[in-house]
Image: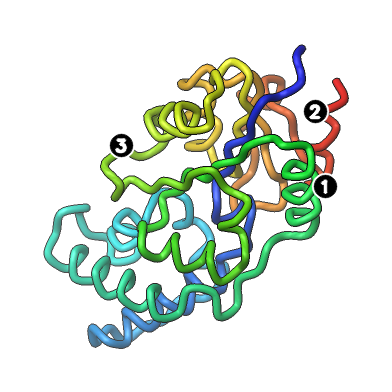
Amino acid sequence: MNKPAAFIFDLDGTLIDALPDIQANANRALLALGYDFQMTLDETRPHVGGGAQKLAANVLNRPMDHPDTMAFYHAFTAHYEQHPADFGRPFDGVMTVLNHLRAQGIPMAVVTAKPARARVQVLNVLGITPYLSIALSPEDGYPKKPAPDMLLRCCEVMGVSPSNTVMVGDTRFDLEAGFNAECSQIAFAEHGYQDLPPEYADRVVSLAVFTDLLKLLND
């Protein structure tokens, strides 16, 4: 297999441990809206990966377009813009990988379900923006993963073919987006928030340690 020409990363659960910030901002939104409960980290974890509106719907057990869901969604995103990375940090090995890829001249991108303005804030605060050719969220006008559209747009901007691009994520949505975009390889970050779906165990590169990703450059 040819050396990868580019890498596309998911954000939350892949590059950064955003769970504490997601929990804190969800709880701020619940408090502001008058709800009488707060969420623990373990209660928050299953809701990460599908986007803020889906998180709001799941937490409140309401339909996606319910007024309560939309009020929670807007409150959550507003708080996230004010508190983008109070607690979150890149996972171990992430900055090593990003620095190595940049030194090799390999372009990188981020595709995430995180709301666009919060994404910009987080990437800036954590110092990841300078490494990226492009970063996209559904709010930029694209369907959510597992649709391949954001990945395909990233490949256009980076000037590479999906068939020579690696997709790296930590959820089923990420893996399926990579398959749908026909990326050359799909990598799964084991430090993320979801278990590797068993039906994909033989179809992806599982990263017990994030720096294992660099082995793909030597294959």
- For residue 216, the mark is 2
Question: Which percent across, then down, holds residue 7?
Answer: 63, 35
In this rendering, position of residue 201 left or right of residue 210: left
Residues under numbered marks 1 and 2 in contact, where contact means CB atoms less than 8 Å apart: no
Callout 1: helix, strand or loop?
Answer: loop
Q: Secondary structure at mark 3?
A: loop
How far apart marks 3 and 2 lie (CA) works out to: 29 Å
Q: Amino acid at mark 1?
A: Val
Q: Is residue 198 visible?
A: no
Q: Is residue 210 visible?
A: yes
Q: Give the amino acid at mark 2.
A: Leu
Q: Amino acid at mark 3?
A: Pro
- Residue sitting nearer the eye, 64 or 219: 219
Residue to which mark 3 is pinned: 143
| Vertical side of 79 occupied by 217: above or below | above
Numbered label attached to residue 79: none
Looking at the picture, tell me which residue is in the foreground, 3 or 59: 3
Q: Which residue is mark 1?
A: 209
Residue 130 quadrant? bottom right
| Snapshot quadrant of residue 147 | top left
Q: Nearer the viewer, mark 1 or mark 2?
A: 2
Quadrant hosting residue 33: bottom left
Q: Please tell me how many numbered marks the rendered image carries.
A: 3
Marks 1 and 2, how far apart in space?
A: 13 Å
